[in-house]
Amino acid sequence: MAVLIAKWVVFVLVSLLAIISSVLVIACKNTLHSALFMILAFVSSAILYLLLGCQFLAMLQVIVYAGAVMMLIIFVIMMLDLKKEEQLKRKVTKTKIAGVVISLLFVLMLVLVMALNSIKGKVGNLTSIGDAKTIGSLLFTRFLLPFEVASVLLLAAMVGAVMLSKKKSFRGENQ
């Protein structure tokens, strides 16, 4: 009983952390701070996966999203000229109004769906889906070829990103 209460308390705290960090991703004016709050949201969702018993999905969440994808986003943020972006942000008011209207429509739709209770999910066991042993055995037996193809594609994308980031050294300094 005490373990169940402890899991519930951790679930509530981590869920609040995920919600707050997700709101801060949108609310922060500094792009780098938004990216850091997104990492916090990814890590808190990985903790929620752990509470559901899906260890492998939690590892993937941290390694792929909080690690690789966020490093790519931070790399792009560092390469951008943010002063030009700030000047463009001041001019755009119609986009802000449209964003607020669309957000309010989404909230209204969410409230209507919750009020009507028209969407019902299936009850199932997530531990067999997110178990590291099950996914590992499937990944290296049945899905070995797609796994290897994905790794070659990621390697090609990494080489392409390095080539794009080093424009002068690959194209020559005189051009």
Image (cartoon, rainbow, N blue to C red):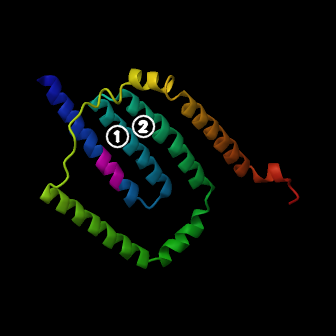
Determine whether the residue tagged by mark 2 lies in a helix, strand or loop.
Answer: helix
Q: Residues within 10 Å of mark 1 (few under 14, many from 20)?
A: many
Q: Nearer the viewer, residue 54 or 2?
A: 54
Residues at discs 2 and 1 in contact (Cβ within 8 Å) = yes
**Secondary structure mainly formed by the magenta segment:** helix
The tag earlier along the polypeptide, 2 or 1, is 1
Q: Where 34 sits versus 14, above or below?
A: below
- Residue drawn at x 29%, y 49% as measured from the top left: 19
Q: Give the image quarter of residue 151.
A: top right
**Which label sits on residue 77?**
none
Q: Nearer the viewer, residue 169 or 84?
A: 169
**Which label sits on residue 61?**
2
Q: Where 133 sits versus 41, above or below?
A: above
The question of residue 4 being in magenta is answered with no
The spot of residue 44 in percent (x, y) is: 34, 39
Q: Nearer the viewer, residue 166 or 31?
A: 166
Question: What is the CA distance from the residue labelled 2 to the residue labelled 1?
Answer: 8 Å
Determine whether the residue tagged by mark 1 lies in a helix, strand or loop.
Answer: helix
The spot of residue 143 in percent (x, y) is: 50, 29
> Magenta segment, which residues?
18-23
Amino acid type at circle 2 is Gln
The spot of residue 23 in percent (x, y) is: 33, 55
Q: Where 108 sits versus 21, above or below?
A: below
Residue that numbered label 1 is attached to: 45
Q: Is residue 104 left or right of residue 137?
A: left
The question of residue 20 being in magenta is answered with yes
